[in-house]
Amino acid sequence: MGDSKLSGKTLKLLGDDSDAHAGKYNSKVAALCASVAGWSYANIEDFHRILSDNSQINLTEADFVEVSATNDSMLIVATAQIIRTSDRRSAIVCFRGTEPTNAVNWATDLNANKVPYLDQDKNIKVHQGFLSNFQAVWNGWEGVLSYLKNPAKMSEDYEEKGSLGDDKPLENIYITGHSLGGAMAFLAGLYLSFANDRQRDELWDKVRGIYTYGQPMVIDNWSDNECHRLIGDRLFRHVYYNDVVPHAPSISMGLFAHIGHEYRWHPRDGWTKTSKGKTVTQVPFATMCLPGIAWDTVGSSVILPFSLFKSPWSIIDHLPTGYINTLNGLGGGDVRGLKTLGGLLANKEDKVVDEMPRIVKPEKTGSVTEE
């Protein structure tokens, strides 16, 4: 069943670590969520097995729920997974990203019409394809929101006990996703914050952070101020090296924007928080990136001379592997066999550098077993 000490550390991280709570970036949570987001591409059985057996995470005895919706004619192929920890206090909501072999998912990404979201005053406009996929798994009795409001539904014995079962409310919610999943995580945060802003729901007070990886732009360029007010302090975006997806959609598809705290990985520096005004920008045209993407893709197969020079537009850097390995301190460099110049300069152990150094206080001993 795994090492209870590691399981206890995960519970303490998600439930009691003050640095993991609202408005504060936590590198351990970032590493955990990167692994969850990466494995969300697997089926629910493998998702459950890997995260339960992983010695660094050990979510043994947690509740695992999957919500999915498919409608090819409406360009919807959406999946979300929810993990509720064994102490029933914390939950990680993870949205699956674009599946590489799914043509409908790619069409979703290209459906970049801007549509109003949440308010009738149209102060917020978002990417239509991302919104359609998000709403398909968020709403309804079996939607993600329903499980967050009634977490007892996640228990295997809920149908037997019904409303008499465990109805303990959640105390901590973490939202995550890679690629398209990051865009959906962004929309989930907007929904909860907006509902809280209008005094319709209090779930936003329990959201400790939105951790996204390789997230594309979601909102209209003129919606950034309102969206930043709503979720900017709790959104932590990660951009690995030359990942091209955070630069999308292209300007030719309309003006979009990023908000929140941005963390970038580079071989020389590891993970660093970017200064204000230096966030990822849009590419003018998608077609201008294709030669670079092709070059880097061939280079990942260690074919000279492609593997010797790094393209500024990389789809290889978009893979979850780079995010998982560097955030978990497994070393950086390229996700290719031959070390490029970037790989040779890479740190052996990557650490997230925030704007201000943290003062680490000794942990108090409690009921959680520690190593």
Image (cartoon, rainbow, N blue to C red):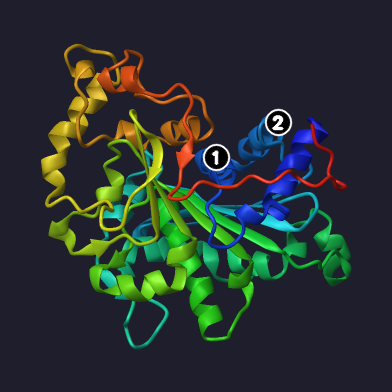
38, above or below 181, in the image: above
How would you rate the neighbour count of disc 1 (Cα within 10 Å): few for under 14, some for 14-19, many for 20 or more? Answer: many
Callout 2, which amino acid?
Asp
Along the line of sight, the residue nearer the viewer: 293 or 232? 232
* Discs 1/2, front: 1
Label disc, if present, on residue 31 of the rendered structure = 1
Element type at mark 2: helix
Q: Residue at x 30, y 39 (%)?
A: 243
Q: Specify the quadrant of the image occupied by residue 36.
A: top right
Along the line of sight, the residue nearer the viewer: 278 or 163? 278
Q: Position of residue 354 (x, y in %)?
A: 45, 47
Q: Position of residue 249 (x, y in %)?
A: 24, 55
Quarter of the image for the C terminus: give it. Answer: top right
Q: Residue at x 62, y 35 (%)?
A: 46
Q: CA distance from mark 1 to mark 2?
A: 16 Å
- Give left or right: position of 345 versus 28: left
Along the line of sight, the residue nearer the viewer: 93 or 136? 93
Quarter of the image for the N terminus: give it. Answer: top right
Residue 267 in sight in this render: yes
First reached walking from the N terminus: tag 1 or tag 2? 1
How would you rate the neighbour count of disc 2 (Cα within 10 Å): few for under 14, some for 14-19, many for 20 or more? Answer: some
Label disc, if present, on residue 53 of the rendered structure = 2
- Give left or right: position of 360 versus 150: left
Callout 1, which amino acid?
Ala
Q: Are circles 1 and 2 on residues that touch, CB within 8 Å?
A: no
Q: Position of residue 240 (x, y in %)?
A: 36, 38
Q: Residue at x 30, y 54 (%)?
A: 109
Label disc, if present, on residue 266 of the rendered structure = none
